Structure formats: C-alpha cells, structure tokens
Image: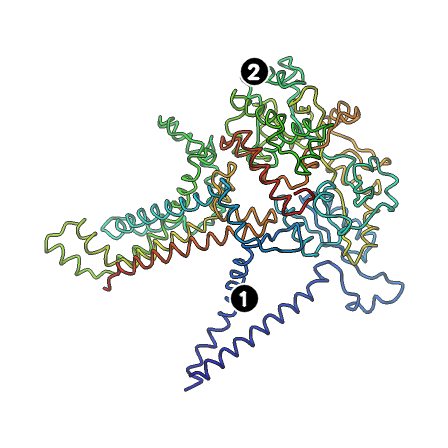
Amino acid sequence: MNARRLYPHFFLYPALLIYLALFIFPTLFSFIYSFTDWNAYRDTIRFTGLDNFVKIAKNADLMLSIGNTVLFAVVTSIGKNVLGMLLAVALCSRIGFKRLFRTVFFLPTVLSFIVVGVLFTALLHPDGFLNQFLGFIGLEGLRQEWLVDRSVVMYTVSFVDVWKGTGFHMIIFMAGLLAIPRDYGEAAQIDGANPLQEFFRIKLPLMMQAVSVNVVLSLIAGFKVFEQVFVLTNGGPGYASSVLNSIAFQMFGDGRWGLGTAMNLILFLLITSFSILLLTYFKRKEVDI
Amino acid sequence: MNFRLQKSALALLTCFVLLFLSACASGNKAEPSASGSQPASETPSASKETAPEKVTLSIMVGGNNKFYETITKEYTNRNPHVTFDLQTVDGSQYDTLLRTRIATKNLPDIVGHNVSDMARRYNPTDNFVDLSGEPWVGRLVNPDILKIDDKIYNLPFAASGSALGIVYNKKIFADLNLSVPRTFEELLQVCETLKTNGITPFYLGNKDGWVAQIWGLTTFSEVVKNTDIMDKINANQLKHADVPGFEEALGQIMQLFEKGYVNEDHLSVGFDGLGGAMNSGKAAMTVLGDFIDAGEQVGDYGIFATPGVDNPDLTVGTVTGWFISKNSKNIEEAKKFLDFWSQPDIIGIQYAEDPRFSAFKDVQVSFNPLMQAEYDEYISQGKVVRQYNDLIAVDTSELFRLYQDMFGKGKTPKQVLEAWDEKVAELAKAAELPGW
C-alpha cells in the first residue's frame, strides 16, 4: 500500500529536481541579482536597491522597449486569435479543399524563425518584393521602408509573427469547435437562430476553454518576443524595434548583468500579472459541455 | 502520512546535496581541460626525459581567417607534440566571451585581441604575460604602438591597424574631373556634381553598427587630435554634448542625408553588401576603411580622410595580435609558438591572405593598390591620427546603436551625444574609473 502510493513520486522527483536546479533556483537568484550592480568589469557585487529600476524608468530607450513589448504582445495576440478563429470557423464549415487549406495555413508554424526572418528580410527590403509589387499595382503611396521606418517597424515585426503563428491558434480553435456536439447547433437552427447568433450565443461560450488557452498562450509568447526582432531588425534602427528581451540580451553582451536581470524581472512580472488576470477572467466565462 | 512526507522530503534533500556535490566536482575537473592543458599524470610514458610532453595550446580569436589554421597546422607538423584547440569566435560574440572568460579566470592559453581594448579594459598586468623580452621584439617595425605602461604584451599582426575614412571610386572621380575633397564644403561640392551626373554620391551600410559608427569615429578623432578633450572626458570633467566639434561632425553626415546624397536603403545594407554595390558603379563613395571587400576590383578604389575638419589626417585603428594568458600552464610553449609566428616565412602566410603593413623589419608585404596609395599619401607622411575608440575609456558599442537611431531619425546629433554621455557615465561608474 505504502509503496504503491509512493510509486508516482519516483517519477515526479527527478523531473522536479532538474526543474528546481535549472529553472527555479536560477530564476530566484536572478531576482536577487536584479537589485545589484553585478557587471563584467568588477569582481565584487554590491546591492544597489532599486537603482537598476530607476535607471530603466529614466531611460527613454529602455522605456520604449517595454512599450514595444506590450504593443507586440497585444497586437499579435489580437491578430493571431481573430484570424485564427476566422480560419477555424471557415475550415470547419462546408468548403472544398479543407485539408489542403489546413496544411497551408499551418505550414508557417513549422518553419524556424531564422528561415522566416531571412525570407521576410528579403521580401520587406526597400527594393524588395512587397514594395515592387505595390508599385506594380499602382499603390506607390503604400510603399514603406518596412523594417527601417521607426513608425512602422514594430507593426511589421508583429505582422510577420501573426503570419507565422496564426495556424497554430487556428488548430486549437478548430479542436474547440469540433468538440461541440452537433445537436446544440441543430437545435438553435430549428429555433430560428441565424449563423451569427449561433456562433456568438452557442459556439463561442462552449469553446471558451480554447479561447482562454489561445489568448494566454499568445500573450505569453508575445511578451517573450525575441527571435522575431533579433532576425528581422536586431532591435533597430537604433532602439526603434527593441523589446525587453533584445535589450536584456544586449545588456548581457555588454557585461551589465545586473541591469539585464532587472529587465528580465520586469518581463517576468508583466507576464505573470497578465496571465493571472486573464486566467481568472476566462475562468468565470468557461462553460462545461 | 506525516512520516511519508518527511521521508520524501528527506529523499529530495539528499538528491539535491548529491546533485550539487557532483556539479561542484565536475566543475573542478573541467578546469584544467578547459584551459587546454593535458594533465601530465595521464601520460606516464611521457615522463621519460627524451620525449617532449604532449601539449595542447588553446587559442581564442575573433573572425575566421584561414591562416590561423594553416599556421597552427604547420607548427604541429614541425613540433608533433603540440596540438591546437583553435576557437574562432564570431565577431559580434567575441567581446562578450572574452569579458566573461577574463571575469571567470578561464582564459585560453593564447588570445587574439587588440592592444587598446586590452589596455583600457582588461588589465593586462594581471591577466597576460609580459613579452617585452621575447626574441622577436627587436625586429618590430613599430613597437611604440604596442606598449602598455612601457611593456609589450602581444605579438602584433601588423605595424598599424586598419585605416578608416571615405573609400572612393577613382574611375568615377577621374571621369568627372573630381579631386579628393579636403574640407567638408569641398565634399558637398563633389556630392552635388556626382548627383547631377546621376551617380549616388554615398552608398552607406548602416545596418551594421560598426560600419555606422565610422563617420563619427573618424571625425571625432580629428576633433580631439592634439587637445586634452579626451583626458577631460575620461576624468569626468567634460561631456561629449558640450564639445561643439562633435555635434558639428554629426550634423555634417545628417546634411548628406538631407541633401539626398546617400542611398535610400542605407539602414538595410550591411558590410556584406557594400563591396558588391560599390563594384556595380552605382555609387562613388562609401564610409568604410581599407578593408573594403571589393575582390578583384580593389584597385579601382582609393581612401581619403573624412573631411569633418579642414585638411584631415587619416584615422588608423589599433593593432591586433596574440596575448598569452598569465594563468596558462603552457606559457613556455606558447612563447615558442609566437616566436614561430614571427618568422618571415610564417607571418608571410598571414600577409599573403590578409595584406597589412608588416609588423617586422625583415618581412616585406606586397600591397594592393588601395593600401599602397594609403601608405604613400598618409602613413609614410605621418598624416595619421589615433581613433576615438582607442582614446575613450569605455566600450563604444552602445554608441554605434545611437548613431543608427540618429540615421533613422530617432535622435538629433545633440540627443545622441547626451544619451552617449549618460551611457559613458554608467559604464565608467560600473568600472569604478577614477573621477566617476
């Protein structure tokens, strides 16, 4: 009896140990380091209180990177989820070539971001395909320096991420849609509900779990943005498209480790607070089938 | 229930202690192998006095020139007991790695780096071996450029560093009867002539920060020449933003943008794209250095000093070379290897691949026309100036990014200088430099 109840623990602890040693402890240590002036130029580490955070708050470039991170997370979450939902609804309806479309839309998710980055850097170059195409169809006015102009670069990076990520969210939405028993829809139709009413009153509430998973996952992924920015712009021009992680990466590279961990702590707080808020919100909206 | 909980907690704790102990143990073991030496105890047969002990020399160097491998292999051919662990590191990662390895006292036996950086940032007295007494020191062409507190810590690859300035297409200049501009006004006139003839005056590659900085670097070097500006800045007695020459210099390059003298896609092009674009003949000048990657057509180009001030001198960089780590267990063998590298037939292999001004009196290098002209017009005349990056006490990579921000219209020259002053203060305080 005793051995049997202990049995599952043998499977738990090895993983837990690795998790503790490689994730929890380093994370906790990094929280401590974010209150120090730890850097590559000196052997001693001193506690400096909130100095790092004051520095960040006072520096326009660093604040811009925090703003960019939030902007990216919000824009990509909305983009991926709205488009993903539309595609899921379309692909669960009666249209032809469903399998082909599913594969096509899911394909970008499988690509590595390095490949996507190289591809889009070429497409979005000032003399690249996109601008030439816009010129060709007579829309010269819409031509932009997509990855260089300060006012558009963050949206360009967000767009590329939406392009890549939508397929993944589409699949989760499709799973949610397909899990709803058909009788609900049929009953509604008999009662005279139009397709919009059927979607908003019946399908959406019933697939709230899928929505909550999708929104939380896309927001977390959005806050953690790094490789998208790294391969497309490396945070540039200047700091125009820098995000928390790209700045933290630079700080570590420059040997300003204390400041880098402080940026990471801010990121951690952002992610945790947004996730908790959203999860409690969605928990209330979820309905059991 | 309680007992079981305690037991599992105990098990957990034990595992933890074991894990930590094993981690520490393996850390200790890893140290000698990381520094590249083979413990003598592993090869008892080598203890016979005749057979030399087997040695692995670890070398860390930025970039990936072929001659590193060619020359180390040649050394192994002649000295079979020595093998090499050659770690060539990507340029952008190199500084980070070197900084970390110095901080963790985990340096390889031999490190390739530049003198000015070593002197200002890495405390050579503590970290590297004094090489002033080595046999090759007497043959050096320009020993002064290597001296740190009157001592020599490295075997240089060249007598001076790369020259930076404006690289121009001599054919285009000749076709349009243009002469090399010696003032900023003359440069503007040259640009205007080029533009009216349908040639883009400047093709810039500002996507790479280190390329984007070259205008600022070369003009700043001129501004501070023969002044005490840098001493004051390094001692926290003067700010960049308060030096009118700096703001003026940055204003000049912004003028080139405003007048339409620069390629539109300058922030999308990096160093890799410059050689090809210049070779295509669509532009007449670029802000770069004598290392332009123009392949066979390198003879088409000349270099002149950036005319931020009137009649400027050419900015030259610092010298790169081999340093030997003080913690190395193979200092003697490393010294032998450096002496080997300095021999004419060996360093000749390096110069054949990468022509530079020869570091040694008894070694002749055949230059490409670009470098020959640079030598005749500037170097041999003593018309050279030390680069700003070698004079400022802190790392300048953040400044590169500020320049890019300025080129992308995110900051004015004044704002760049103010932001840079802030960064300098932060870095100087972190390093506890005197006066900060």
Count of numbered circles in the view: 2
- In the image, B16: left or right of B81? left
Image coordinates for residue B385, horizontal then vertical, percent: 73, 29
Q: Residue furthest top?
A: B177
- Location of residue B239 by image quarter: top right
Give residue B192's mark: 2
- Location of residue B397 by image quarter: top right
User: Which residue is located at x 15 percent, y 57 percent?
Assistant: A186
For the rendered model, the colour scheme is: rainbow
Helix, strand or loop under label 1: helix
Q: Is residue B123 above or below residue B222?
A: below
The answer to which of B199 and B233 lies nearer the viewer is: B233
Q: Residue furthest left?
A: A191
Of circles 2 and 1, the one toward us is 1
Q: Which residue is mark 1?
A: A21
> What amino acid is at disc 2?
Glu
Of the 4 image quadrants, the one containing the C terminus of chain B is: top right
